[in-house]
Amino acid sequence: MAIHIALTFDDNFWAPAFATMRSVCLFTTRRQELVFHLCHRTLSAAHRADLEAITDEFPVTLRWHDLDQSEMFADIAARMPENKRLSNIVYARLMIDRLVGPDVERILYLDCDMLVRDDIALLYETDLKNHAIGAVRDTSGAFITGGRDLRANRDLFDPASYYFNAGLVLIDVARWRDADIIGRMEEAYATGVMQRIYYDQDLLNLIFRDRWFRLPWRWNVIDARPVHEGLDPAILHYTGENKPWGVLAGLLHTVAFARLYRHVMTNDLFYRFARHRRKRWWKKTLRIG
């Protein structure tokens, strides 16, 4: 049985995407069943070659989805609120059912700031109990939705309701399609709700409020820090300010499994990605390019 996994990224995040993909491959025995759906903005030839190299090491299948050729994605991205920390590429997950082929009945969406260190097949085969999605509770949900003094958006979100992190979502494609995500987004945009919420994660929580399957916490350990290592997390989600691709992350032990992450990304790509970020920083600072 094929294991379908979706990743979304742009040309500045190809290396973390590769690391997430390679970590999936390294820690499962069912590699020949892996099908990666790479939902991307325009990629340089060199970066695409880096990603394609995964097939030289593992017997996996890659399916490419160029979002810059999608009018639907352009329309969705234009309508969604901007987020300073995140690229609008994350909105591709809202249309994931329209990107994948009709042969895909289930798909696992993963953010690209993740490190997988357990068999993804165990997660993929989870019984969702007739729910459209499975996800992990985000323990910061009340603050994300409520803001200062937890008073904002009380008409939309109840702090007593569980709120999930959308960085990992196990999707029953047929039930997801029945939920009419794009239609609900259009409705939220027309009523002004989209202008009030925290990008698409809030939207998904509104749509699936109290109608999602709660996965064990270890499948999405949010803001993964060194203290989490002893808890045997299955997937580390580096949502904090410190990232495992920081050159000194392993030496300073700023995040969980930082040294492992460098070797998963591979040392060659790790340091090339560091040079890429430094070059981008100088261009931005000097306002060139």
Image (tube, helix red, strand yellow):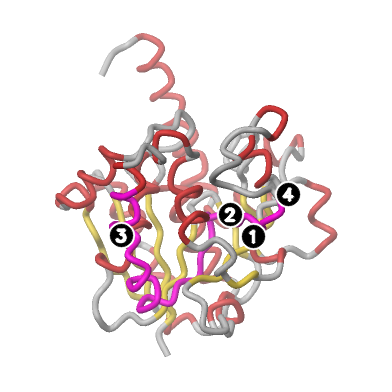
Q: Earlier in the sequence, mark 4 or mark 2?
A: 2
Q: Which of marks 4 and 1 is nearer the N terminus?
A: 1
Task: Between label 1 and label 3, give the one nearer the viewer.
Answer: 3
Q: Which of 181 and 274 is in front in this view?
A: 181
Q: Is residue 259 above or below residue 117?
A: above
Q: Could you tell me which quadrant the C terminus lies in?
A: top left
The residue positioned 64% from the left and 37% from the top of the image is 146
Where disc 4 sits, the SS reads: loop
For residue 256, which numbered disc appears in the image? Answer: 4
Residue 52 magenta-highlighted: no
Q: Earlier in the sequence, mark 2 or mark 3?
A: 3
Q: Decide: few, some or many residues near mark 2? Use Cα within 10 Å; few <14, some 14-19, many ≥20.
A: many
Distance from label 3 to label 4 (Cα)? 32 Å
For residue 160, which numbered disc appears in the image? Answer: none
Q: Decide: few, some or many residues near mark 1? Use Cα within 10 Å; few <14, some 14-19, many ≥20.
A: many
Q: What residue type is labelled 2?
A: Asn
Where disc 3 sits, the SS reads: helix
Residue position marked by numbered label 2 in the rendering: 165
Distance from label 1 to label 3 (Cα)? 22 Å
Distance from label 1 to label 2 (Cα)? 8 Å
Task: Between label 4 and label 2, give the one nearer the viewer.
Answer: 2
Q: Could you tell me which quadrant the N terminus lies in?
A: bottom left
Residue 179 magenta-highlighted: yes
Q: Which residue lies furthest to the front in this view?
A: 155
Q: Are marks 1 and 2 in contact (CB under 8 Å)?
A: yes
Q: Nearer the viewer, residue 135 or 256?
A: 135
Magenta range is 160-187
